[in-house]
Amino acid sequence: MSETIAVIPGDGIGPEVVAEGLKVLQAAVGTDTYVFQHHELGAQRWQRTGEVLPDDELAALAQAKAIILGAVGAAPGSKAIPSGLLERGLLLKLRFSFDQYINLRPSKLYPGVATPLSESVVAQGPVDFVVVREGTEGLYAGNGGSFRTGTSQELATEISINTAFGVERVIRDAFRRAARRRGKVTLIHKHNVLVHAGGLWNRLFTEIAAEHPDIETDYLHIDAATIALVQDPQRFDVVVTDNLFGDIITDLAGAVTGGIGLSASANINAEGKYPSMFEPVHGSAPDIAGQHIADPRATISSMALLLDHLGRPEDAKRIEAAVDADIFANGTTPGTRRTEAIGDAIAARL
Ligand code: IPM
Ligand code: MN
């Protein structure tokens, strides 16, 4: 019996790149493995109906085996969306409701891909690492408020939530992933200043590291980590960090490895109690929407993450290899092939 995958194409280039993701997914596993159930959510839905994520949609999504999300965001000239409405009301609501505590973001510098890294840094060796970003806590938790709002005496707080439970499970996940890779985990935090949250992260990291004598460990403060990403990205294998540091560092990681047009991501509930969600890191790029020039390879790589999560690691590797080969053969110059042509070419390699 086929399993249901919920699809939220979203806005802008979202539907264009998602179509190619589904094409490649089906090329990898056939047309009978999954049925796709489309959900119209995002800026256009809100502009049309005033709804962001109605309860019945959330309930339907909860039944799916996995969720594929394109991108959401308003088109220029359309009704403006209040800042945070889609972020908090849709994306983060999905991540939190479905306890997607592992935000997994791989970065690989492909040979021949244009990078802002210097030649001497590229010559140091292959860049291939994955960030395990905590996805449900930290400064994203929504614990804050404002008082005397809008006055010159306004007071605003945003408190970072870090639970031992939440920190432990994400660090354990990072160690498990390192064991499947090159065997190194780097914790990124700022425990010299954020002594409470950083203290908790550092202590649990040290304790869990002691259980894994075969895994090499490393620590960087977030500020130093931005330097290392630009000057010595080869030092990273698995990075584990909190929600906001992970948000920032993965944009930088995407930028130094050829642009976020190639960056895949997964929001994983490792126990499978809730559906995990797979999405490109990039946004809805309304400036190029409808032109069929968007690069679908971040979405296609996210399909590999989906298959790996759904217990099909061999199929995932085939997609990864097909994307690698496509990038190697065709590079990343934007606009040289249509979105559909890139999807067709990768599907054909499977
Ligand atoms: C991302 C995005 C989101 C985040 C926003 C849109 C809520 O920047 O997926 O990295 O901050 O996590
Ligand atoms: Mn981000």
Image (spheres, rainbow, N blue to C red):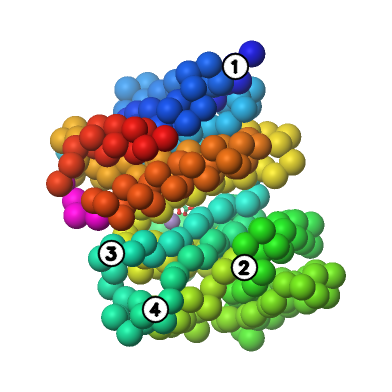
Contact check, label 2 and label 3, Cβ < 8 Å: no
Q: Answer whether residue 154 is visible to the viewer in this image.
A: no
Q: Secondary structure at mark 4?
A: helix
Q: Is mark 1 within 8 Å of ligand 1?
A: no
**Magenta residues (range):** 331-335
Q: Which residue, given by chain and number where applicable, does mark 1 sit on?
A: 2
Q: Is residue 39 left or right of residue 347?
A: right
Tags 2 and 1 touching, CB below 8 Å: no
In the image, the residue with mark 4 has its CB under 8 Å from the nearest atom of ligand 2: no
Label 3 – label 4 distance at C-alpha: 18 Å
Query: Which element carries disc 2, helix, strand or loop?
Result: loop
Q: Amino acid at mark 3?
A: Gly
Answer with the quarter of the image where residue 216 lies.
bottom right
Q: Earlier in the sequence, mark 3 or mark 4?
A: 3
| Disc 4 residue crowd, few under 14, some 14–19, many 20+, Cα 10 Å | some
Decide: is 247 above or below 340: below
- According to the picture, the residue beneath numbered tag 2 turns out to be 182
Identify the mark nearer the N-term, 4 or 1: 1
Residue beneath disc 3: 112
Instruction: Tell me the residue at 39%/78% (across/down).
Output: 230
Q: Quadrant of the N terminus?
A: top right
| Residue 199 screen position, x and y as percent | 73, 77
- Looking at the rendered image, the quarter that the C terminus falls into is top left
Q: Quadrant of residue 207?
A: bottom right
For image coordinates 29% across by 37% down, the residue present is 345
Give the left or right position of residue 63, taking residue 53 as reference: right
Considering only vertical position in the picture, is 54 above or below 332? above
Mark closest to the chain's N terminus, 4 or 2: 2
